[in-house]
Amino acid sequence: MLELKNVYKTFNPNTPSEKRALNGLNLTLEEGDFVTVIGGNGAGKSTMLNAIAGVWPIDSGSVLIDGQDVTKLPEHKRALYLGRVFQDPMNGTAADMEIEENLALALRRGQKRGLAWGIRSKEREEYKELLKTLDLGLETRLRAKVGLLSGGQRQALTLLMATLKKPKLLLLDEHTAALDPKTAAKVLELSDTIIEEHGLTALMVTHNMKDAISHGNRLIMMADGKIILDIKGEEKKKLTVDDLLHQFSVASGSEFANDRALLG
Amino acid sequence: MNLDIMALMRALPGSIAQGLIWGVMAIGVYITYKVLDYADLTVDGSIATGGAVAVMMMLSGQNVYVALICATLAGMAAGLVTGLFHAAFGIPGILSGILTQLGLYSINMRIMGKSNQAISVDKYDLILSLRDIPKAMMVSALFCVIVIGVLYWFFGTELGRAIRATGNNENMSRAQGINTMVMKVIGLMLSNGLVGLAGGLYAQYQGNADVNMGRGAIVIGLAAVIIGGVIFGKLFTNFALRLVSVVVGAILYFVVIAVVLWLGLETTDMKLISALIVAAFLAVPHLKGRYNASHVKRGGKENA
């Protein structure tokens, strides 16, 4: 489904702020895998997602989606395969456009955009039905500007947009980190539902170890731009936060020094 | 000082006609400044290019409409250059526009052969002229209506909405598969095409094309956009109405200029007045925001 082969990426090469963000990263996802990704700050979690999405070119290695080598494809072309939700709720939607316009943009992800009218009337019915499933009252506000919505509403909408046209792979980049706990839980639950319903393959970066354990069928831990731990199946089901902390110190040779990860 | 109110009244129709012509230009500025969120300084050059192309073509015996179409195309070419500077070569937006604008000065001189080319309404079949203000008002108003209509349609299409999304949020747009570079180039071409058209109209209105006719044009365009936005921003949320408010903003700008002239200032003072008007109108939303923030009434975020 997804294959990352020996991916390297260094930011600001040959400068004092040089940072090797991905360091020979290898990862293979099976169809239907829902993988949670944890790791300390600067471990390369978001960088991995950005490398998959093609936000910038990688230094070496290759990225394959569904057997297709997309390493050389620019970000907007890879969008055909990917649904993405970002950490910042402001990032996933166009604030000055209406809810239905945002959805219509998402419905045409990866398609050629020509001079046909941007929204067909039968789409609206579909959008209403979908928005109803969010249970946020958005189904009556199709013409409202997205900028008027709360962070949680925007994130839920982004999630809907990311999966409106079924993606080969869903990338969730700490998409609940900027939300209050209650909203975060709701968005997370919604993510679960959508992933299960559509049988999506997904990568979810999180800072919260409990979430990482309780969601998905596979968990990977990153450090220094590499995967240091990969737990799946039955083994993952039995996992506890203490196990993880222990495994981390064994695998990386250091303590998991991150308050945010511990508090979750 | 003797202030004759009738003199002002006589000047106003001309101001309205000018405002309508510059309204076409200001709509172009709206596309870059508001829709694309891109401060494009190409327009100071491309408006003169439009004027130069239109006048030279008419002088060589071409039909006025053909001349206007070519003025539009010339403006689009200028926008294409700025777009490529920015999108393909990574030059910052404002600088890209400045480079094109500077280069256009030489090109405009080449087109005209000298710094000013007159075209007489007596000898040529112009569609508008300051000799016949009511007609000039009607013709330029018609152009505004057509431009607004076409743009309203265009920005409702898939492509048009993709351009708006690009101006709103580039990250999101790319994530939705939109080629943001291409969208910016198209937007810049569209914008400068309209500016070139306005140049062709304005050259006819004043009876000549001048290599300096675009100096400070961006400020006039911004003034129109901002005045329109400050006055009608809350009222008009529909896209077509927002464009109408830009045209009204342009008219108001020229009315203010007429009043200032009537009060006895020199025409050469106009650049300073223009700059001050734009600065004042830009400051209003900012100061209002600060006031609202310090006086705890629920203000909501400015999202114009």
Image (spheres, grey):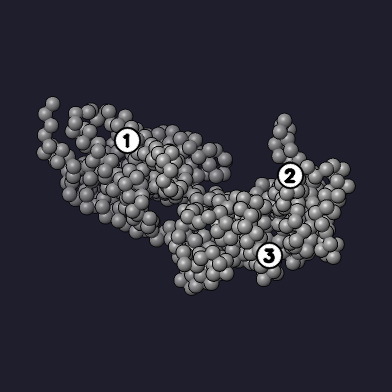
Dot 2 falls on a residue whose secondary structure is: helix
Q: Is residue A95 above or below residue A11?
A: below
Circles 2 and 3, Cβ within 8 Å, touching? The answer is: no
**Residue ID at (18%, 33%):** B262
Q: Is residue B104 above or below residue A56?
A: above
Residue A73 lies, in percent from the top left, at 67, 54
Corner quadrant of residue B41: top left
Q: What residue is disc 2 on?
A: A259
Asked whether A183 or A177 is in front, the reply is A183
Label 2 chain ID = A
* Residue visible at 71% across and 57% down in the picture: A204
- Measuring from the top left, give residue A225's x and y in whole percent: 78, 45
Near-viewer residue (A112 or A179): A179
Q: Distance between the Cα atoms at labels 3 and 1?
A: 54 Å
Tell me the kind of residue under disc 2.
Asp
- Look at the numbered disc 1 and give the secondary structure of its residue: helix
Asked if both marks, 3 and 1, belong to the same chain, the answer given is no
